[in-house]
Every structure is written in C-alpha cells, then in structure tokens.
C-alpha cells in the first residue's frame, strides 16, 4: 500500500443540500479499521435516490459532513482486513456499502470516489466481461428486485410468477428496470405491465427486449382506464405517483402489493439506520401511519408490505450475481465523469426529482 496517495477526489455534499450543491473535494484516502473491511480502488460508483435523500436531510437524523455520495460501486481490491476470506488484493469486485445500521453514519463510505471501504459480505466478484460502469449500477436495484419478487411470491404462496399478471410501473426507472427483468427472466412472469413517459416509449423494447408485454404511456393514458380493475395478481411499485392508484388494479381476494416507496414501518427504519438512531416518538409515528394502508385495503384480502432492499441477504445477492453473469439481468444507466461536476449535478437532479432519468446514474471515476 506504499504507492497509495494520501488524498483522493470524492463527490460530496458539503452540507444539507440538493444536487446543485454537490462538490468534488480532496479528502484523505480511508484506511481499514475493521477486520472484515476492504479498501477498494473505485472505477465507477452510482448516485441513488437514497444519496439524494440523505444529502437533503432526514427528519430527526444527524449526519456528518462532508457527506460522501454513492452507496454502490465497482473497483479493484487494494487491501483487506484480517478476517476477509472471499477476496484478496487485485480482485475486481462490485457491491454496496449498505450495512445494517451503520453505513449512513460511517465516514469514507461513498463510492463516487477514488477509494472507498467496503465489507466483504456485501460484495461479489465482477465477471471479466462486465464493464465497470455496468457493475457499478446494478447491485442495489438487482438485489432489491429479487427481494421484492420473493416477497410477492410469499404473499401469493407460489414459487414462480408463471400464469401471473404483474404491474411494475417505471420500466426504465432506477430500480424498475431491474424488477421487470427479474420478474420476467428469473421468476417467469407471464405478463408484465409497465409505464414510462412519452419520450421513453420507444426505448423500452430497445433496452429491455421481450421483457414488458404491455407498455402504457402514463402522460397520455390513465392507467386505471387501460388496466381493468381487479385484473392484476401482483403489483411491485417503485414510484410515489402510482402508489395509491395501483391498489384497485389488484384482484381483491388474492392480490399482493410490494412497494419500495411509502411510509415504512419503524422496524424497517431501525434496520436501515440502527436502533439507536430512531427516536421512540418517530418510531411511533411510523407505526401509526401503517393504519392508513389498512384503511385503503379495507374490504379486500390484498396483502401489502413496504420493503427496503438488503444486500446482507447473501443468498439473494448471489442469485443476483448469477443472473448478471449469465445475462438475465442487465444494467441500464447513463454515465458521467466524476470531474464533470456540472453534468453530475444535472443528472443527479433527475434522481432527486424522479423525472427525466433513464436507469441508474453511474459516475465514472477512472477512464
């Protein structure tokens, strides 16, 4: 490690701000402090909705600044802690820094940087044929997609989606692109229905050939007018705009609704942030809010759950890795260079607003 520089370039939020306030800063290269950590020379990282939310601020939660941006990425292992067994220096890896209850509060955890730390159990070996940018933008949506579909299968008591109609709005969104692929190519959904805006209609079949069976232009069509009420077996939702309007589409006696947006339970928030980071009164408010969903579903047997993808599900992570290696799951993204801060801000703003982007936002650190 003698050839490591003392400082690195890293994308940060210097204070609570939107993407317009992001900067590229010179900060110290992190050092391994835990036996299961790896120091990774990052080739590409990804900016996510979670990054934008943290940078803007989360009620009742305190963060340190400058805040490193990027919760997933890909790179080359430089050094390993004493208990790392899966990887060694020189290995190409990809994964996330989302680890139960600590990630958001630890320094040096952003992957839109020249170097970053990662814990080995949330990383996979990068296939030689997979470009760095593809690897950087697939871990989060991939593992979340697998967990979302599995939760839906648990609700309907099935092992596959064969014979099922599944509504997944946002086919080209930052997570939707992965869910439609996982539902179709891994779990065999018979019919995938999805939505995009008018400018993206022609891109879906180009980027996701044979995946979406029915595509709706939500800017010119009302989803409720196109999809018959009570005709859908499963909804996996990634977008606030379609949150409540999707409930009537489900079969009232057997429908399953899995959402990645909405008001989470206190249990979910405690998993993400750590038990000691969630005040009791905030937890109480979150749990009381769950009665709203019970009200919306009154008179039906629809099963509902909001989830937050966990890369610590090693089985799900490895299933994702296999799907990526065999081409069943492919990344969709647009890429910008770390040093092009103006373009980084423009593209990150699309994530922040949820409008205009296609797939993930990947930040190239090394060309």
Image (cartoon, helix red, strand yellow):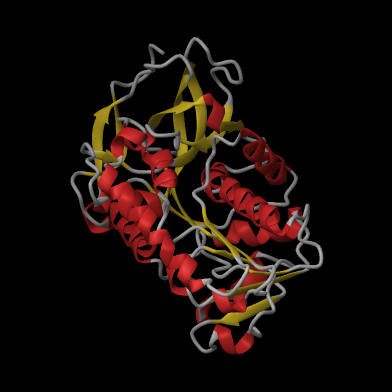
- Image spot of residue 92 (x, y percent): 58, 29
Residue 34 vs 274, above or below: the answer is above
- Image spot of residue 263 (x, y percent): 40, 59
In the foreground, 304 or 44: 304
Left or right relative to 163: residue 85? left
Left or right relative to 96: residue 352? left
Q: Looking at the image, which residue sits at the far front?
A: 299
- Image spot of residue 305 (x, y percent): 54, 57
| Residue 365 visible | no
Q: How many marks?
A: 0
In the foreground, 295 or 207: 295
Left or right relative to 23: residue 187? right
- Image spot of residue 230 (x, y percent): 66, 80
Looking at the image, which residue is at 35% across and 54% down?
A: 286
Looking at the image, which residue is at 69% across and 79% down?
A: 231
Residue 170 is drawn in which quadrant? bottom right
Looking at the image, which residue is at 39% across and 49% down?
A: 337
Q: Looking at the image, which residue sits at the far right?
A: 163
Residue 352 is drawn in which quadrant? bottom left
In the foreground, 318 or 350: 318
Q: Looking at the image, which residue sits at the far left?
A: 15
Residue 345 is drawn in which quadrant? bottom left
Residue 100 vs 216, above or below: the answer is above
Residue 41 vs 152, above or below: the answer is above
Left or right relative to 214: residue 88? left
Task: Name the image quarter holding the N terminus.
Answer: top left
| Residue 274 visible | yes
Looking at the image, which residue is at 61% across and 20% down?
A: 86
């Amino acid at each position: 490690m003698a050839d490591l520089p003392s400082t690195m370039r890293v994308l940060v939020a210097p204070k609570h701000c939107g993407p317009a306030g992001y900067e590229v800063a010179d900060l110290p290269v992190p050092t391994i402090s835990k036996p299961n950590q790896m120091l990774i020379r990052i080739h590409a990282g990804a900016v996510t909705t979670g990054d934008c939310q943290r940078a803007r601020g989360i009620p009742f939660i305190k963060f340190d600044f400058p805040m490193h941006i990027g919760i997933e990425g890909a790179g080359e292992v430089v050094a390993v802690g004493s208990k790392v067994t899966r990887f060694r220096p020189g290995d190409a890896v990809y994964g996330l820094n989302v680890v139960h209850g600590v990630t958001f509060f630890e320094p040096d955890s952003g992957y839109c940087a020249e170097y970053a730390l990662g814990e080995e159990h949330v990383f996979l070996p990068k296939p030689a044929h997979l470009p760095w940018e593809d690897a950087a933008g697939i871990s989060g949506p991939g593992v979340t997609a697998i967990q979302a579909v599995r939760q839906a299968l648990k609700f309907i008591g099935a092992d596959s989606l064969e014979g099922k109609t599944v509504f997944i709005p946002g086919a080209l969104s930052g997570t939707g692109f992965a869910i439609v692929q996982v539902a179709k190519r891994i779990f065999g959904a018979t019919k995938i229905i999805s939505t995009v805006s008018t400018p993206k209609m022609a891109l879906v079949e180009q980027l996701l050939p044979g995946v979406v069976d029915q595509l709706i232009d939500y800017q010119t069509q009302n989803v409720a007018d196109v999809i018959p009420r009570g005709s859908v077996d499963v909804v996996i939702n990634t977008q606030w705009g379609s949150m409540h309007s999707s409930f009537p589409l489900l079969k009232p006696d057997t429908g399953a609704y899995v959402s990645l947006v909405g008001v989470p339970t206190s249990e979910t928030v405690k998993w993400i942030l750590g038990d000691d980071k969630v005040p009791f009164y905030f937890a109480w408010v979150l749990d009381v809010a769950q009665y709203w969903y019970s009200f919306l579903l009154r008179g039906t047997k629809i099963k509902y759950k909001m989830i937050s993808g966990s890369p610590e599900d090693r089985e799900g992570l490895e299933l994702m890795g296999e799907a990526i290696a065999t081409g069943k799951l492919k990344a969709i993204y647009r890429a910008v260079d770390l040093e092009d801060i103006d373009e980084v801000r423009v593209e990150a703003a699309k994530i922040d607003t949820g409008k205009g982007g296609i797939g993930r936002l990947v930040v190239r650190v090394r060309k």
